[in-house]
Image: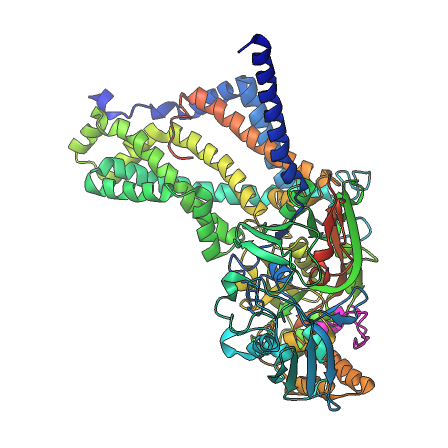
Amino acid sequence: MTALETAETGETTGGSQVRGRLRRVLSSPSGLIGIAIVVAHVLTALFGPAIVPYDFALQDADAILQPPSWAHWLGTDMLGRDVFTRTVLGGREIMLICTIATVIAMLWGSLLGILLALVGGWVDNFVMRCVDAMMSMPWILFVMIFVAALGTGTAALVPILGVSYGLSVVYLARSATLEFVAKDFVLAAQARGERRRTIILKELLPNVRDSLAVQAAMQWSWMVLGVSSLSYLGLGVAPPTPDWGLMVADSRSMMAVAPWAVIFPMAALSSLIIGANLAVDAAAKSLGVDRNARPGK
Amino acid sequence: MSKSGVIGSGFGIVLACALLTAAWSQPAQAEKVLRMAHDLSMGGKESLDPLSPVRFWEVNDLLYNRLVRLNEKGEIEPELAASWTPNDSATEWTIKLQEGVRFHDGSPLGASDVKYSLERINDPALESPVTSVLGMIDHVEVIDALTAKIVLSAKHAGLPILLSDYRVRIIPDGSGATIEQTGIGSGPFKLEEYDPEGRTILVANPDYWEGAPKLDRIEYLAISDADARAQALLAGQIDFSRVAQEQGPLFAGNPKFVLSEFPSGGWFGIVFRTDVAPFTDPRVRKAVRIAANREEMVKLLAGEGHAIVTCDNPVKASDPYRADLDCPQDTELAKSLLAEAGFADGIDIDLHTSNLETGMVRFAEVYQQQVAKAGIRVKLVIAPGDGYWDDVWMKETVVVTSWDERPADQILNEAYRSGSSWNESYFSSPEFDALLDKARASLDFAEAKQAMVEAQRMLFETGGTFIPYQQNVQFAYDKSLTGITPVIEDQIRWDLVDKAEE
């Protein structure tokens, strides 16, 4: 009976388990590199304002498109702004937006997904068909409709991303939960007359937690790329906030003449995304989650 | 058949194939095609009706003729009008037409076509922006087959220069309902395919009255993004494009291209709608304009020597009617004007811009930084390029605008006279309109200039349009092209442009 009552993950060893997993992630070279890159980016974002030599918005008519030098380590852009300063600060806004939006997407997406799997029937069918319909629309189009309605900038982007990225979480959480809803420990909980909320929080959530954690990390790195694309198109972060996508869009016409204004923000963005992906891959392996078995993007 | 016969016939077939291939590829090489791009700024609604507010001006320049045009020196010269003579009070102008001009459908040009085309300007159903420029045309009388008399409702000594407007084109009598689709004019090129969102194709008009054009075809591709246009030119997809100042270096050192630069009266500006609060208050309007540092804007955006500082004055530097004004950055005055108007804590502005033309967003960014010191907090809103003129401009309260040069009388009437359809700042002042009327009615240059100068000063004091500088125009084109003169597109003689064989 005891075996039936306990959810399959074994909650008791929580702390040491997390440490064990982290050790496993770090023991793989790619995982170590990935985590190092992400941590470096996070630290740069946190302490960037203290280390940058210039004001990110400072325009200097006498220093337009200067190549890298002692005064401007990574050169200057078309308005004479310091590329180093802007590259260092260029990830702050985007990481903040993506982190908050990921939390929102995971919260509503996973709770709705688990609930639907548990409830089943026509409610599940109806809601999932709605989700299908929304997911059949290309992501960028979906987001652009909202951006057109709500405008650009951080305050608009967070809810837009939180909603749009939550759709694939609904899918994942629901299919991950379906594996467990017919299992004995859930049936037993239902037979005991446990409330639905208790079943979700105590029995189901612990079992799908690993899949969701991997999904959250993936969501975050997709979002970073997504917001950069939006900024590149002029629909994301508004100038003069330093942002990698915006910096690339701004200077792309001068790439042949002043490559530094494009290459450094591009390198920063790619390294963050590659780092996040390496870390997620290693984490998925150590958790035994198949990260390719996800729906959506 | 003998063995040698087989070899002989085989050789014959090979030779025939080779000749056929050569013959096939020969005409393709010989055809001279000029490929250009337009910016799709009317979002696909580009109209072949030259008077339409969404006129497809790039193509219309090639399909139709005007009565008169400006030459390379900026002087008026005959086009369809062989001569033009005013009466003593300049209320009636007699136009004699060139002989032997035919429209693309074969019909001859006559005075009735001039009457139809000019009287159409004032058709309210068209909502043409030209109405504000040539609204004083009362009617046109047909004197004989090739003579027309333009009768004005008020005297105007400078009518011919207004007739050189790029939209005042002569179309066949009665063709207003179909012109939008047919594009039948008397110009050097004829319409073959009209697809503003894709490829619009024009072919040479062999019977053109000034002599057959040197090119065989002109193709216009829709490319809405300015950087994409420059890249298309670099990649050889198009042969000619206007390029922004900052794109110059991409072509300057390249032996495949010619980069030509010349002074012009064109500008980027910021429009503050004078009919929407807080810009209904002239103090706020002046504050948001004088808070900017124009010299620095020239340095940052155009480069020294590539633009001339202007004090919100749309009249170009070389125009005889231009007012010389002084407008240094004055942050303190801007602050105190805002405080007087009740905005002691500064104001917040949503400034709409777009990547439609290279530098439009950067222009807004520089303004945003410069005026911050005066307590003007600007938030940039970046709109999509296609349809910008249709959906954003004249709709949102504060927008970045872009104009090409126009003669003083034309631009002041078109963009600032009360109620004119391209009055983008919704500026309305009876006093200003009276000054324009006075200038038009005056037959004395000094008197007319005084009124014009007064009107320009008024714009600087109370207007809703910020114009920091007027910039040079740059063309970049394939070096095989000849005949491209340093004048804006509608003044280029496209019939004389030629393409050397590669």
Q: Who is closer to the viewer here, A262 or B501? A: B501
- Residue drawn at 26 percent across, 27 percent down: A180
State the residue lying farthest toward the top: B3
Residue B325 on the magenta segment: yes
Instruction: Kindly tell me whether residue A90 is visible in this rendering.
Output: no
Q: Quadrant of the N terminus of chain A?
A: top left
Q: Which residues are magenta?
A: B314-340
In the rendered image, the vertical position of residue B47 relative to residue A293, given as above or below: below
x, y percentage for residue A145? 44, 52
- Residue B421, compared with residue B216, is above or below; it is below
Where residue B134 sits, quadrant-wise, is bottom right
Q: In the image shown, does B324 or B141 lie closer to the viewer? A: B141
Image point 49% across, 76% down: which residue? B125
Residue that sits furthest to the front in the current view = B1
Q: Let me know if residue A11 appears in the view.
A: yes
Residue A125: x and y, percent? 24, 40
Q: Viewed as shown, does residue B440 lie left or right of B386?
A: right
Q: Nearer the viewer, residue B379 or B12?
A: B12
Query: Which secondary structure is most common in the magenta stretch?
Result: loop
